[in-house]
């Protein structure tokens, strides 16, 4: 782990400067180094989860908007889904930063 400490840490800390794209590039380009590839893959999926959930929430809001004719019901659904999405995104963001720092200061 200590040999590739900087690139592994940058895969997680890329949430600050190039989320999803940097870990994907590292994941694709490091086929011969399984340690870097594994860390970059984990960072990629960790940063991609909020985007996938956001698309799912938009689809769910759109579908229920067609079926429910009452705006108050769909309004509450939007608030609840956005609150859950915000919590997941915040947790993913913070965990990426914590994990990146842990890897960087590990022995």
Image: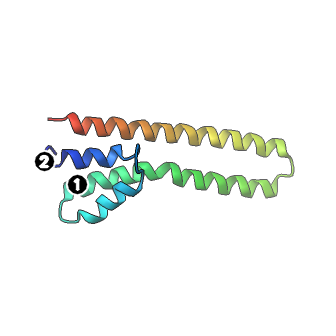
Sequence-earlier tag: 1 or 2: 2
Quote the CA–CA distance across marks 1 and 2. 10 Å
In this rendering, position of residue 90 left or right of residue 29: right
In this rendering, position of residue 5 left or right of residue 89: left
Residue 107 placement (x, y as % from top left): 14, 35
At mark 2, the secondary structure is: loop
Reading the image, the residue beneath label 1 is 36
| Up/down of 63 relative to 14, above or below | below
In this rendering, position of residue 34 left or right of residue 101: left
Residue 56 placement (x, y as % from top left): 60, 55
At mark 1, the secondary structure is: helix
Label 2 crowd bin: few (<14), some (14–19), many (20+), radius 10 Å: few
Along the viewing direction, whichever of 28 and 63 lies nearer the viewer: 28
Q: Residue at x 77, y 46 (%)?
A: 74
Residue 44 placement (x, y as % from top left): 38, 54
Q: Residue at x 68, y 54 (%)?
A: 60
């Amino acid at each position: 782990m200590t040999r590739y400490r900087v690139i592994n840490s940058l895969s997680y800390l890329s949430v600050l400067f190039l989320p999803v794209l940097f870990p994907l590039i590292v994941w694709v380009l490091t086929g011969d180094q399984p340690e870097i590839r594994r860390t970059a893959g984990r960072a990629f999926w960790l940063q991609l989860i909020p985007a996938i959930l956001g698309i799912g929430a938009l689809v769910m809001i759109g579908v229920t908007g067609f079926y429910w004719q009452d705006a108050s019901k769909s309004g509450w659904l939007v608030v609840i889904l956005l609150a859950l999405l915000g919590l997941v995104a915040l947790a993913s963001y913070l965990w990426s930063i914590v994990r990146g720092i842990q890897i960087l200061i590990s022995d």
